[in-house]
Image (spheres, rainbow, N blue to C red):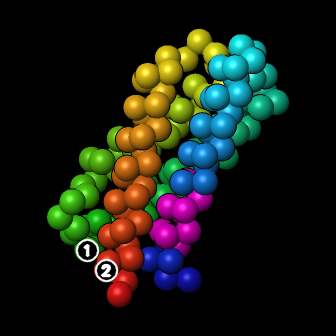
Amino acid sequence: MDNHSMLGQLNERLYEYTKEIEETFLSVKMKGEKGDFFTRVKPFADEVKEVVDRWKKESAAWIEENRPKNLHATQIDSAAEQMEMISVQAFFPETSRTRFINYLQSVRYVLTVLRANINKYET
């Protein structure tokens, strides 16, 4: 599998995680109950972090190689950091809704821009 399709798959996986994270956040907010740290929060956050780490490395290499005009390594770093934060914060009802939604939208924006660039450069 070449790097482009690997990056595309990692990107799509992270986008799917954003949906799962948003659903978890909304459910936790509605119920007002924290997720159990050792059975739910940590395993999920670790799983997300593993994909984020691979995605960050592949994205950085891809940006270096293709130099898209509307996407920079700093955006990838920020999105990776925000993704890790929201993957944990989603499980806590006291998490600020506004900040959470802003991080979620920011991550999705970077994932969407990267997806569009991958598609553009592959054709």
Q: Quadrant of residue 9?
A: bottom right
Looking at the image, do the residues carrying marks 2 and 1 touch, with CB atoms under 8 Å apart? yes
Q: Main secondary structure of the magenta part?
A: helix
Regarding residue 82, the answer to whether it shows in the image is no
Instruction: Tell me, yes or no, whether the highlighted magenta stretch contains residue 11.
Output: yes
In which quadrant will I find the N terminus? bottom right
Q: Residue at x 40, y 58 (%)?
A: 112
Name the N-terminal-most of marks 2 and 1: 1
Q: Which mark is residue 121?
A: 2
- Give the total of numbered labels: 2
- Image: magenta residue range: 6-14
On screen, residue 38 versus residue 86, left or right, reads right
* Placement of 123 over or under 74, stated as above or below: below
Q: Which residue is mark 1?
A: 66
Name the kind of residue labelled 1 in the image: Asn
Give the x, y percent position of residue 108. Answer: 44, 48
Tag 2: amino acid: Tyr
Kind of element beneath mark 2: helix
Q: Is residue 37 left or right of residue 119?
A: right
Quarter holding the C terminus is: bottom left
